[in-house]
Structures are given as structure tokens and as C-alpha cells.
Amino acid sequence: MVLTGPVAALRGALGFLSRIPVGRTDEDWEAFRRTPASMPAVGYAIGALVALPVAAAALAPVRVQSLAVGVAFAAWLSLVTGITHLDGVADVGDAAVVHGDADRRREALKDSALGVGGTVALALVLVGLVAAGAAVADVATRSLADAVALVVLAEVSAKAATAALVCLGDAPHEGLGSALTAASGPRMLAGVALVTTPAALAGGAVLGSGGAGVVAGVFTAATVVAALAFAWARSRLGGVSGDVLGATNEIARVVGLHAGVIAWTLS
């Protein structure tokens, strides 16, 4: 059956942003690339699925160490979403340490060999993800609902940050980045904001009296990551590439999780 409109866009987004076996047709891909709001829209389902190790540990009859939960969280996330975006982190890390003009940095993005910059970038993201999973596990010992809400908020905000770059950016060369940015524009940011709003409202309600601060912390963190990634990509690469989009998704998730936990602890 051929799906059209929002349903096809959501299926295309799930097929592209996760390894959930929904199947993916050319029509789904076309609908997805023309609908950046589908990215944060599927963040709700992906976030809930990614939170399963945290929930399982909190509900286990014996205490599970937070660090073990953090490792399981990172591993499970890779199984659910794949490692394609981590490749973007590695490529951007390699490009970031290149001395020279934008052409040389773009060459580094296309180089399949992993350099020092990419290794450090990957290590920081993975260590940050394990630490974030452990911190969320500690939250779950006091409130499982709050912990799940944090994970979902971070996932939706990371997808919204990536979608914002799609709406605002132009790609420096043909590829995944150009396929997405060419079909979007600044006016589509309204759709991204509309789809993201329920996460903020529901998250604030679940998290209680300090919920507004936690929501603000998560979304502010993702926004800062997106702004820095956009500025760096324009000045250093000449535009937003597919690797930049993938790296933004991964970094915004990690930073959003940590910001959310800190805000929750202070609330």
C-alpha cells in the first residue's frame, strides 16, 4: 500500500532515523524529506523506546548499578537508532581539526578513514551518553516517570534541533544534506515548533512543580547545540551537510540529557 502525506512522512522518518522495521519506500522518503517536522514527531516514539533499559532497571527486583544502566542505555540506543549519525560525529570531528579552507574540511568529511579528531569526538559523545544514561537511572530510582520524560524530551529536542538546521541551512555539496535542505525552508520551522510543543507541555506536567525548568533546560541545550553547529558549518564548511545533521542529533541528545538531569536535580 502506498502511503501519502503525514503518514508517509512519519514512516519515512522512522525508517531513516531508526532501525524500527517499518519498511521504507521511495514515496516515504520523498514525504519525509519534504516534512522536517516529522523528525521531532517520531522523536516521541524513539525516545519512549530508548528509555526501556532505564525503566527495566528501575523495575528490577534487585538494584542495578547506575553505570551498568548507562552502558546498557548507550548500547540499546545504538540498536534502536543505528550508528549512521555517529559516523557524522566522527567525520565532523575530523573536519574540525583540519587546518585550511572549507574545501580541505569537506575533503575530510568524505574521507572514510578515522582520524584523531573523529576518535576524540566519538569518545566524548559515547562517554557523555553513558554518563547521561547513568544519571537518568539515578533519577528513575526516585521517579520513573520523570526519568522517561527526560529521555523523551531529549530525543524530541535533538530531532527538533536537527530539523531546524534542515529548515535554515543550505548544503555545501550534493548529498544527503542537499536532499533535505533543498526541500525545506525557514517557513517550515513553524511546523517543527508545533510538533515539539506537546513534548514541552506534557513533560512539564509529568515533571511537576520543577517541570518548566527541566523543559527549559533540555530545549535550551538543544537550541544552543543547533546554533553552534549551524554557525560552525556555515563558516567552516560553507553549509550544512548530512554529517553535520547527524552530529547535531547525537550531540544535542547528550547535552540535552545532561542539562535536563541538572535542572531536575536543582528543581
Image (cartoon, rainbow, N blue to C red):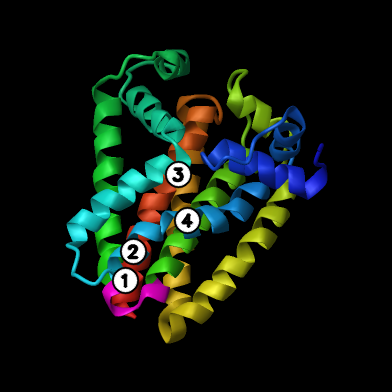
Which label sits in the foreground, 4 or 2?
2
Residue 221 shown in magenta = no
The answer for how far apart the CA atoms under marks 3 and 4 are is: 8 Å
The answer, for residue 155, to whether it is visible in the render is yes
Q: Are marks 3 and 4 in contact (CB under 8 Å)?
A: yes
Q: Amino acid at mark 1?
A: Leu
Q: Residue at x 24, y 32 (%)?
A: 120
Identify the residue position indicated by label 3 in the image: 80
Q: Quick check: 162 left or right of 3? A: left
Which label sits in the foreground, 3 or 1?
1
The answer for how far apart the CA atoms under marks 2 and 3 are is: 16 Å
Which stretch appears magenta?
A: 140-146
Q: Amino acid at mark 4?
A: Leu
SS category of the residue bearing label 3: helix
For marks 1 and 4, the one nearer the N-term is 4
Identify the residue position indicated by label 4 in the image: 49
Q: In this orientation, which residue lies closer to the viewer: 23 or 126?
A: 23
Q: Amino acid at mark 3?
A: Val
Identify the residue position indicated by label 1 in the image: 59
The answer for how far apart the CA atoms under marks 3 and 1 are is: 21 Å
Relative to 202, does residue 167 appear above or below in the rendering? above
